[in-house]
Amino acid sequence: MAIVIRSFGKHVLLACLAIPTFAACSAEPGSHASNTDADRSSSIGLELQLASGLTLDQASYTITGTGGFSLSGDIDISNSQTLSAVISGLPAGTGYTITLSGNTTDGGTRCAGSASFDVVAHETTPVTVSLACHQASSTGSVSVNGTVNICPSLDGISASPAEVKLGGSIELSATASDADSAPAPLTYAWSAASGTFDDASAAAPTFTCTAPGPVDITLTVSDGDATPRCAPELSTTVLCTPTVADVQAILDANCTSCHSGTAPPRGLSLVDVRAVVGAPAAGCPQKLRISSGSSARSYLVDKLLGAAQDEGGCFSGKQMPLGKAPLAASDLAVITGWINAGTP
């Protein structure tokens, strides 16, 4: 990029923005020049050519000189194909500086440059101004600071005993370690779908069975590192077995009002549920009333559900308890859990 500064008497012609070449704008030498000795002012002519593909909407200039002289302004070229203007009133003298600046129309490039020159009355002073154009950065950087943490290890969970009756307790413990104990000491978090812990954040809590059947107990160990999958997790299964007393209490509340006495329906007395274990079912001869170890083959469970559990099985009569609401799912779980556990 270059600017050529020419003196044309009192007036300066600033021209022309052209791509790829420019045509100089001219004025008749001396056409505006004063012939008197009192008129010592002069002017400069400017020509600017930008690299192909760059366009300016506006250019700013500042001219400074001896004796504190200063002249500045803007040249609007948004509606023009050339950069042109007339600048006058430059006193003849030495030590002038012109500074040019402007932004391209896309805002992505800023151009600026300056040069020194002298003004001699009625003479032409050629000046070349080199403009440095800088494009706005389209990339950035990131500062990365890494930390190293060895995640904890969880090798196993112990449950003693692994099976207890409802209401019974199981002692739990874990084998866990952390090689660097960072960023914090190990913490423990125990969870289960049923049952209670005396302290779910302890390394070795006590678990109490509150619902029948298998219970999955899960432990998560953390050293405070929030990185996904840094905290290991491990599960074990314990068995909460209902007692015969739990089953008898349910039957007493729902069934023995009918199934008792000297002549109970179908000859089925449920006053002592243990007496029913292994007895043939009157309504389905190929089944037992209670088949120890298999609630699916126990006709008592079929009657409580209101349908045969096994495909091709038999069912007669109505769902029990007769004339009452079906047993709650929790009560059925106690009965089936006791049968599946071998009717202990």
Image (cartoon, rainbow, N blue to C red):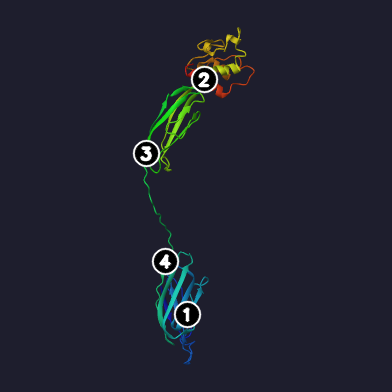
Looking at the image, is mark 3 or mark 1 earlier in the sequence?
1
From the image, tell me which residue sits under label 3. 178
Looking at the image, is mark 2 or mark 3 earlier in the sequence?
3
Q: Quadrant of the N terminus?
A: bottom left
What whole-number distance in Å separates the C-alpha atoms at marks 1 and 4?
A: 27 Å
Residue drawn at 57 percent across, 17 percent down: 251
Is 189 placed above or below 65 here? above
- Is residue 339 among what the camera can see? yes
- Residue 43: image x %, image y %? 46, 83
Looking at the image, is mark 4 or mark 2 earlier in the sequence?
4
Q: Residues within 10 Å of mark 1 (few under 14, many from 20)?
A: some
From the image, tell me which residue sits under label 4. 134
Q: Element at badge 4?
A: strand
Q: Residues within 10 Å of mark 3 (few under 14, many from 20)?
A: some
Looking at the image, is mark 1 or mark 4 earlier in the sequence?
1
Pair 1/4: label in front: 1
Looking at the image, is mark 1 or mark 2 earlier in the sequence?
1
